[in-house]
Image (cartoon, coloured by chain):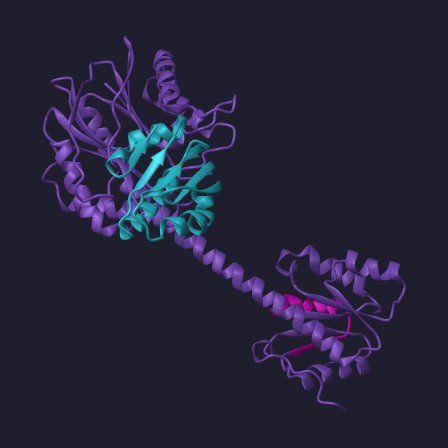
Chain colours: A cyan, B purple
Amino acid sequence: MQVKLTPGLGGVEVAVSGTLTFDAHAAFRQVVMAQVDQPGAQPVLLDLAGLDYIDSAGLGMLLLAREAAEKRGRGIILRGARGQVARILTVSKFNQLFTIQP
Amino acid sequence: MSPGPAVPEALRNAALLVVDDAPTKRALVSAHLRRAGFHNITLAEDGLQALEALGQASFDLVLLDILMPGLDGFETCRALRRDPRWAELPVLAMTGLEESEERAEIFAAGATDLILKPIHQAELIARMVSHLHNRQLIRGLRDFAERTNAELAAARQMQEALLPGPALLAEMEARYGLRVASRFLPSAELAGDLWGLWPLDGARFGLFALDVVGHGTIAAINAFRLHTLFAQDRSARDEPGLFLEGLNRRLRPLFSTGQFATMFYAVLDVARDAIAYAAAGYTSPVLAGRGGTRLLDGSGLPLGISGSARYETRQATWRQGEALLLYSDALSEATTACGSLLGEEGVRDLCGAAFASGNGAHGMADALAQAASGAHGPADDLTLVCLLR
């Protein structure tokens, strides 16, 4: 997994690419969770366009990020998922938990 | 004489064997050892006596002279290494041989380390402590690994006992006119997968498959928890949507954030050719028959994430002669020969081909299991269930 942070108007946009599986747990916690767990009025934008594969452990990390954001009163937007990632988000009905954008 | 280096308390009981043909050398080495705190010392005068002593008691380390009449140090070392009981016993060769080739030969014969004569007490004790300490660590790790493996094997048996046994399957096959074949292949010792079935009435039975996030011990414990929840509440077994809702509500407080389970539950009615089912993000089951294949809808929020999640009951037909296949995502996410993911469409094609081959439920399960093992073996727990009417 690679993570790229882009500062924007409403806060930081986090681009996650590569594969999001159990092996990425430490890196995800260190970088993504640290960004999510910040005060702010804007939702956190996770750009998944560069993500090729996610497994159930990866979905679990998204849920952890969602919980951290909610504690700060923020939502999470998942943007640009494609291929297997888009399919698993649909099958798991994650649109009930996250704002999902094309 | 100086007091010399002290031996850590934990190593003082080490059983030592000192092998030397010269009585004065034996006495000297033995005095060095006692002064450092060792007290469990056995003396041998030559190789044969040493091997005899090794056969009679258990030792932690051997101090072995090389040049001895009869069976010399080289031969003694080779002889004891041939015996698997002493394959890892530390053997410290005491030698005055200073040519590097001869020293190499001592190692080739199986010595762990060597100490040059004349013996320097501090060096002797330091080397011994180092080897005894390693031996203790390795033993500790091995004991731990053995205990863990034994416990995992027992846990694995407990997990297999949760799966439908031959008696239940035979009863279900006879009662509902089915052939049932299944495969259950954990990727680690324990799996986060589970499947099962239960009779409801003369024409209907329930069938479930589930996959807890991750694999290994924690996933398996969560799978056991789910199994316990089914057993406690049998009330909504004939209403798939309500069944998943009830299960989800009870599961939510047990799971921490990030943990969840995907699940499929169906009520199959062989009198009405009907399937009523609900899903929580499980893979999409396949129906395969002479007319082709159809995918059921496995979508739904996984269990354990949101206590208020709703699960609708969906309908499908299941005709005589058709096969219903459930599979964990280890199959749909298996890598094909060309490097891409198999995917649900790939599984569907595979099921169609396996059905057409006419090898029955077991033939289909075999074909799918083979596809799931792919190029690299299953990376995740694999469950396959094939029900053929």
Residue B53 on the magenta segment: yes
**Vertical arrangement, residue B138 with respect to residue B294, above or below:** below
- Image location (x, y in percent) of residue B214: 37, 43
User: Residue B64 versus residue A47: which sits nearer the camera?
Assistant: A47
Q: Give the magenta-colored segment's residue range.
A: B41-58
- Most extreme residue toward the front is A9
Residue B61: which quarter of the image? Answer: bottom right
State which quarter of the image contains the N terminus of chain B.
bottom right
- Image location (x, y in percent) of residue B324: 27, 21
User: Residue B142 versus residue B368: which sits nearer the camera?
Assistant: B368
Question: Is there any visible trace of residue B59 in the rendered image?
Answer: no
Residue at image point 41% right, 52% down: A34
- Image location (x, y in percent) of residue A20: 43, 39
Residue at image point 65% right, 83% down: B6
Residue B201 on the magenta segment: no
State which quarter of the image contains the C terminus of chain B.
top left
Query: How many numbered marks are there?
Result: 0
- Most extreme residue toward the top is B291
Image side of residue A27 versus residue A39, left or right: right
Image side of residue B29 versus residue B83, left or right: right
- Image location (x, y in percent) of residue B53: 67, 70
- Most extreme residue toward the bottom is B1
- Most extreme residue toward the right is B99
Residue B191: which quarter of the image? Answer: top left
